[in-house]
Image (cartoon, rainbow, N blue to C red):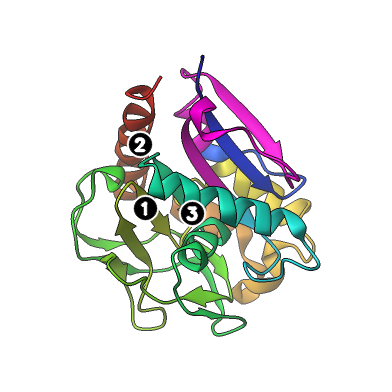
Amino acid sequence: MQRSVLLVHHLDFETGGHAARLTAHLPTRIVAFPDRVPQLDAIAGIVVLGGEMSAVDVDAHPSIGVTTDLVRRAVEADVPVLGLCLGHQILGVALGAEHRAGAVDETGLLPVDVVAADPWLGGFTGELRPMQWHSDVVGLPTGATLVATNDLVPVQAFRYGSALGLQFHLEVDVEVLRRWSIVAEPPLGEHLPGGDVAGLVAAYRADATLHRVAEQGFAAFAESCRARL
């Protein structure tokens, strides 16, 4: 059976950014707001992308429940799983972590301290300034390793077996930022000081460290998936 990397979307205008680009050399499959997902035997790896809903709001958004169940089973089966923002929260919930809705307001290129080297972050440790846009958070699942933190959100990233959760949007590229500033409702600019989307994009373009971590990290994730093809 030909396995593929599954990209789970929870936004109509999602592109997947670097996550999609750096897994495109592998067989990939996109599911959006899924009511059903492939069997684990058909999956080489899973990327769960961001969204505007809550990771615990399964009554209003049944696809969240489907995705949470998939992620839980995937981790048990040692399938590579990468959760980004909402995906990070879904992963945390799947592993029994505390979920807090509306706990913070993090928007912009904000500092996080990467405290544990992880291959899916290119082995980087130190300060990173990735894109954030969220208000919900999760705690650290029992048995997980804390990978990144900051003063506002103690669990910015964690590793649990075959899974890595990133509260921040490492997948963001310029096209993602453009869509967030035009298509998202409310648009990104309403959440930035002075609505300075252009300044944010310029700062993103200039951050060589962030680009290197994204390139190396997603490449390492793709290699973990390739090993299951």
- The stretch of residues the image draws in magenta is 19-48
Q: Amino acid at mark 2?
A: Phe
For the point 21% across and 51% down, the residue is 124
The residue labelled by disc 1 is 164
Q: Are marks 1 and 3 in contact (CB under 8 Å)?
A: no
- For marks 1 and 3, give the CA distance: 13 Å
**Residue count near mark 2 (Cα–Cα under 10 Å), binned few <14, some 14–19, many ≥20:** many
- For marks 2 and 1, give the CA distance: 10 Å
Front in this rendered view, residue 148 or 93: 93
Q: Position of residue 157 (x, y in %)?
A: 36, 63
Between disc 1 and disc 3, the foreground one is 3
Seen in the picture, residue 204 relative to 167 is either above or below; the reply is: above
Q: Are marks 2 and 1 in contact (CB under 8 Å)?
A: yes
Q: Earlier in the sequence, mark 3 or mark 2?
A: 3
Q: Amino acid at mark 1?
A: Leu
- For marks 3 and 2, give the CA distance: 18 Å
Front in this rendered view, residue 186 or 60: 60
Q: Are marks 3 and 2 in contact (CB under 8 Å)?
A: no
The answer to which quarter of the image holds residue 90 is: bottom right
The residue labelled by disc 3 is 72
For the point 56% across and 80% down, the residue is 105
Looking at the rendered image, the quarter that the C terminus falls into is top left
The residue labelled by disc 2 is 221
